[in-house]
Amino acid sequence: MTDLLLGIDIGTYSSKATLTDPGGRILRTRAVPHGLSQPAPGQVEQDADAVWWQDLCRLCHAMLDDGEFQADAIRGVAVSAIGPCLLPLDEAGRPLRPGILYGVDVRASAEVDELQRRWGDATLLAHSRMAFTSQAIGPKVLWLQRHEPEVWAATRTLATASSYLVLRLTGEHRIDRHTASHWMPMWDAAQERWATEGPAVELLQGRRLPGPGWCAERAGEVTPEAAAWTGLRAGTPVAVGAVDALSEAISVGVTEPGDLMLMYGSTTFFVLVQDRPTPDARVWTVSGATPSRCNLAAGMATTGSLTRWFCDEFVREQGDVEAAYAAMFGAAAAIAPGADGLLVLPYFSGERTPINDPHARGVIAGLSLAHSRAHVFRAVLESVAFGIRHNLETLEDIGAPVRRVVAVGGGASHGGLWLQIVSDITGRTQVLPEVTIGACYGDAFLAGRAAGLLAESDLAGWVRPGREIVPDPAITARLTPRFAQYKALYEVTKGVVAGLR
């Protein structure tokens, strides 16, 4: 074996790596679990070294330590990670606190509102091509300044998860433009570079940012120090990398205008490929993986994490988490569409797109003594499908047609029932590719690009079609009025929910 490509993805609850050959043949895959910290309601964090870097090192050793594959054969490495996250670094590049996670962390809700008022919707949309939400980094920077001034005083550089890992691997601090797009208002969307005047200067106060690049660019090479930690060969090329969702889109060939990746994970994430931007405050207009593409991105805050919470709290005593999932999916399959009148809002950690309301919370409506645990779980699955439909219809309303929906992610592996519920409620066929091991597979392709072994056109040979999930038109018609009720339920309860805090 002479040429190997290594892709590593650092996710919310686990990290995963794969080794491939330049033709996309999977040679080895490994995964390691990890947790997250919630120091206060609405705050979600992870330790950059104990979780992100340690996972990367563990995965490298899991790939190499048995001697079957040699570090000298690895021609390129690429890393993706959750994002956008906020990690302050000192002058030596050491983390000053745990990383503040992406849109599931809603600690900066007050700062979101304040910055939105300060600069105005029109100015923000023109500058950043999207509105402030819990996904934006700018409000979290302001939160850090106000709530942890001693950390801010020591901060010299701001990083995100993927950029920190590239820094540890290469000594070069780089970030992909897709992730950087969420660093509003520091990012100049029209120029695809860091802003040099206006709100960005005011907010940064002289702190440094990683150098932007395209995902497949070579960021640098593995340093001798990083080689000692990871077992990789010093001098191995390392790509700029990407946020996990973009790498996952690449992994399944979502690269042409009208292609949409629907990622079932701890959150649900959408990436729609475009050849020209159509900015709208309800979603996120971001850079693409290459200069010729841009993306409309969207995301729900709690989907897989909601089903996990349900099973942990109400089913886990029956066995491990996988047994709990299997039991509940089996029970929910026996419940008729519509869950016998139950309706859930899946906003258990606020909601991102399209309502962009960090104050939203979960609602279970229509409960009676006739309902069982299986009814509630079925309604939870349907609530995610209603949220997906809400996002898809928003994209269409913006004038960004969806030509093809490709389903990926861990939630898709739970298979039939959930995917069928989503297709039935949205009325959309979903394509499930043959290979769906995740973002690490897309990272391996980026590693090949950075090493000069692959061209962009070679991706076609990596992606193989699988099966399709086709909607039942009768169920779609039956649940369309329920979708209207789903949207109405949020409107009539949001004032009450806000008063419960």
Image (cartoon, rainbow, N blue to C red):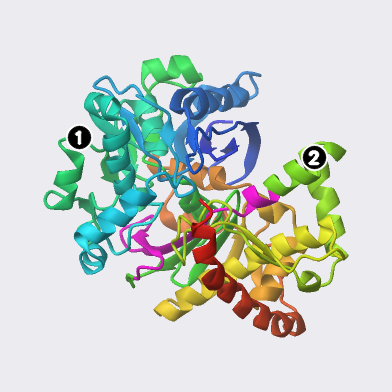
Q: Nearer the viewer, residue 341 or 327?
A: 341
Task: Specify few, some or many for label 2: CA neighbours under 10 Å numbering under 14, 14-19, or 20 or more.
Answer: some
Residue 2 sits above or below residue 180 on the image: above
Which of 20 and 248 lies nearest the eye of the viewer? 248
Above or below: residue 266 compared with residue 236: below
**Any magenta on residue 144?**
no
Say which mark, if any, is on residue 447. Answer: none
Tell me residue 499's x, y (percent). 50, 57
Rendered location of residue 180, percent (x, y): 32, 48
* Residue 303, magenta (yes or no): yes
- Cα separation, mark 2 vs mark 1, equals 45 Å
Mark 1: few, some, or many residues within 10 Å (few <14, many ≥20)? some
Does residue 105 appear in this view?
yes
Residue at disc 1, secondary structure: loop
Asked if residue 323 lies left or right of residue 200, the reply is: right
Quadrant occupied by the N terminus = top right
Q: Does 432 sit left or right of 179 as displayed?
A: right
Earlier-in-chain disc, 2 versus 1: 1
> What residue is at 54 percent from the left and 59 percent from the top?
497
Q: Label 2 amino acid?
A: Arg
Circle 1 is placed at which residue position? Answer: 207
Please give left or right for residue 380 compared with residue 354 in the image.
Answer: right
Q: Residue at x 44, y 18 (%)?
A: 227
Disc 2 versus disc 1: nearer the observer: 2
Residue at 52% in and 72% down? 491
SS state under label 2: helix
Task: Specify the quadrant of the image occupied by residue 430.
Answer: bottom right
Q: Residue at x 75, y 57 (%)?
A: 415
Magenta-highlighted residues: 280-307
* Type of the residue with mark 1: Arg
The residue that disc 2 covers is 316
In the depicted structure, whether residue 57 falls above or below residue 263: above
